[in-house]
Amino acid sequence: MNDTSHAGGAASLDVSIASKDYHSASGWPLRALEDLRLTLPAGKAGAVVGPSGCGKTTLLRLIAGLDKDYVGRIALPEHGRLGMVFQEPRLLPWRSVIDNIRIAAPHAREEDIAALLDELGLAAHGSHFPRELSLGLARRVALARALAVKPDLLLLDEPLVSLDAALAEALREMIARLIDERRITTLIVTHDLGEAIALGDRIFLLSPRPARVVATIDVPTPRGQLGKEAAEKIEAQARAVYQGENSHQGKSSPR
Ligand SMILES: Nc1ncnc2c1ncn2[C@@H]1O[C@H](COP(=O)(O)OP(=O)(O)OP(=O)(O)O)[C@@H](O)[C@H]1O
Ligand SMILES: [Mg+2]
């Protein structure tokens, strides 16, 4: 029914999901994804944008191999080593920051972990416990933990949600720098178009549930050099896609 290939050094992340159904308590199947196709070249950052509840987390869980109950095919790039940052930071509460990272990446060298903490502004927090961290710090620890495994594919589920504007901006810049420097194939899920344009080389616009890709937009030039006007043009293009979709279906679009 499905096939996820982890090996073989594919040049891109290729997703082709015919359907993903959940089996609800009422007994009725709930279709989360239908005929969803996307291709992301290795080393590029893709941003998946879609309205609340459309199936974004479901898509990431399928790509991560956490849920194998779907019909379709997913091919992962390179050796398929995966780093994932969940919508909630999911740190082990009884372990320090540094132990949370060590447990996820037992083979990481101490100096690499120290460098990562430093790079993410966490050097002073290594011995802290998750309850001592703000949400912004906890997100950065979750990011450090995902990067510590030296992933070939990095999956980020709404990494900036619920942060205040200044913190979100700072973390967004940090993520943009990290993915540019490391050239890890990265898929970021968001419901914020501006965030997608700021972080993605390629933007995938999802429909309301059941999610499918209604448009793919390539963001030109290195991201950091994208002018305000060019960004606004892409945003207008994306909104036009959603308006067209909504007039067909009478459904909501992302912010
Ligand atoms: N384990 C599950 N069992 C049944 N239904 C589920 C399950 N997980 C998700 N769903 C349903 O599938 C749909 C898609 O959920 P999903 O979490 O993937 O959406 P999302 O786009 O990530 O939402 P959000 O924007 O709130 O993060 C929703 O209707 C959700 O209620
Ligand atoms: Mg989600």
Image (cartoon, helix red, strand yellow):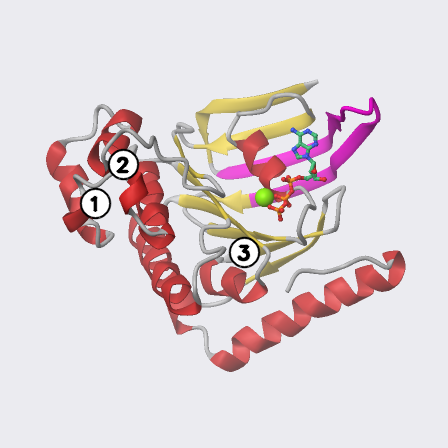
The question of residue 116 being in magenta is answered with: no
Magenta segment range? 12-39
Q: Amino acid at mark 3?
A: Arg
Q: Quadrant of residue 96?
A: top left
Q: Element under label 3?
A: strand
The residue that disc 1 covers is 116
Q: Position of residue 87 (x, y in %)?
A: 49, 43
Where, quadrant-wise, is the N terminus in this rendering? Answer: top right
Q: Element under label 2?
A: helix
The residue that disc 3 covers is 202
Q: Position of residue 43 (x, y in %)?
A: 41, 46
Where, quadrant-wise, is the C terminus in this rendering? Answer: bottom right
Vertical placement of residue 72 versus 148, above or below:
above
Q: Which mark is residue 148?
A: 2
For image coordinates 29% across by 53% down, the residue present is: 181
Q: Is residue 44 visible?
A: yes
For image coordinates 55% across by 30% down, the residue present is: 75
Secondary structure mainly formed by the magenta segment: strand
